Amino acid sequence: MLGLLAALVIVALVAVGAIIYAIRASQRTRVQQGRDVEQLEAARVQIETERRAAEVEAKDAALKLRSALEDELRERRAEAARQEQRVQQREEQLDRRLDEVTSRHLAITEREQQLAAAQAELEAARAEEQRTLERIAGLTRDEARQQILAGLDRELTVEKADRIRRAEAEVRAEVDAQSRELLITTIQRHAADQTGETSVSVVPLPNDEVKGRIIGREGRNIRALEAATGVDLIIDDTPEAVILSGFDPVRREVARVTLNRLLADGRIHPARIEEMVAKARTEVGQRITEEGEQALFELGLQGVHPELVKLVGTLRFRYSYGQNVLAHSKEVGFLAGMIAAELGVDEHLAKEAGMLHDIGKAVDHEVEGSHAVIGGEILRRLGRPDAVIHAVQAHHYDVEPTGIIAFTVLSADAISASRPGARRETLASYIKRLEKLEEIANGFEGVERSFALQAGREVRIMVKPDRIDDAQATVLARDIVRRIEGEMSYPGTIKVTVVRETRAVDYAK
């Protein structure tokens, strides 16, 4: 019973505790609800305040925008008013301009009418004047015009010819002065020494007893040497010397080298001679190639065909009036390059043309024709430039020179050949050539006397004026030139000058 009572008491206490907890929880809920209501009311008040502030700001913004729009509208209206005023002013100006143009047009029209009337009066006066002049002169207008134009044409022709002559004289004087200065400068820049060389090969002997060994038994050694080299051996009373004679200097050089080797070896017989000749040919061939390469290297010419190199080296053994052709060719190459440099043209091309201008002399004893033409054909076959080929063919006027390079080579060749001591000519042949010149000139009818001048480079002919007129003098000069070209051999060119002089003499008594 006590246990039940205790349980009931416990249950009652629990129930009372639950009731008390529920009451308190309800109280806390009501308190929380009151707080929420207060917060909601505060939020509503804040939102209302912010709404009113936003409305105020919106009204202020609207007022400002409206004010700005009104200001802009007023500005635009003012600008439109100004534009309208300017347009109106321009219209007024255009109206005034139009009035001025109209008045000017009327004035011009009136002036044109006046001018037309004056022109008509002038034409009528000219027609009347022309009729009067035709009646007085007895010529029509066209005939008078033709006479006036013919006279004017004659005057203009004379004046034009006079001006042309004066201009040519001025240009010729200026060009002559510049040419002299150019050539003098070039000569001074290349002042090469000149020495005469001989084409006779002399082989010195240790003693005269060697001559018998060279001749051999019944002359078999000398015959074998001459047959192998193609050179004549002259063994005479000249002490301790043997002279080699032959038209080909390369053969003479082979014979000289062979003879020197035989003398050094001491064994001289036909078999040994043939062996030494073969070795000498090989040695001379190598020397020719080396000479050609060295000459081309000195002038800065590269990429030259090997055959052309050998031909250049062969010039080392060629002579023209005692002047070595290779030395002459190198000098012409240097001079042509210097002249081209002064003129501002292709210096390398001028050097090549000058160096190769006498290349035909390497084979002219084997091929018929002028060495200039032969050289041009060789260079054309080996693919050298056209300007070089033309300069080589034209350096003795075998063809007419046309380019600057050709005239450059002509000048350089003349400078090299005319240097003191460059070329040698015997006195007898020199005098004979001068006499031949005068003899040819004196052989023509009407020639009074003739004079060979400038070392045979010019012949001056005096003719009888009563038998040779001016036209015949020109023909005579051409005939003499052809006769000289056909009968004489000479270096360079010969100038033929025919002089016809008429004198009238009287005496006052």
Image (spheres, rainbow, N blue to C red):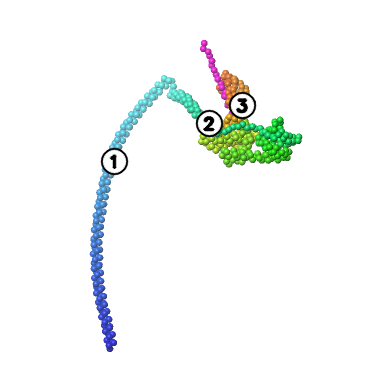
Q: Residue furthest bottom?
A: 1
| Circle 3: residue type | Ile
List x then y, in percent, for residue 502. 55, 19
List x then y, in percent, for residue 382. 60, 39
Front residue of 228/166: it is 228
Residue neighbourhood size for the residue with mark 2, other residues' Cα within 10 Å, grouped as few (<14), some (14–19), many (≥20): few
Give the mark nearer the N terminus: 1 vs 3.
1
Which structural element holds mark 3? helix
Give the mark nearer the N terminus: 1 vs 2.
1
Structural distance between the alpha carbons of marks 1 and 2: 80 Å
Structural distance between the alpha carbons of marks 2 and 3: 32 Å
Front residue of 394/161: it is 394
Magenta region, residue range:
492-509
Tag 2–tag 3 contact (CB < 8 Å): no
| Circle 2: residue type | Ile
Tag 1–tag 3 contact (CB < 8 Å): no
The residue under label 2 is 184
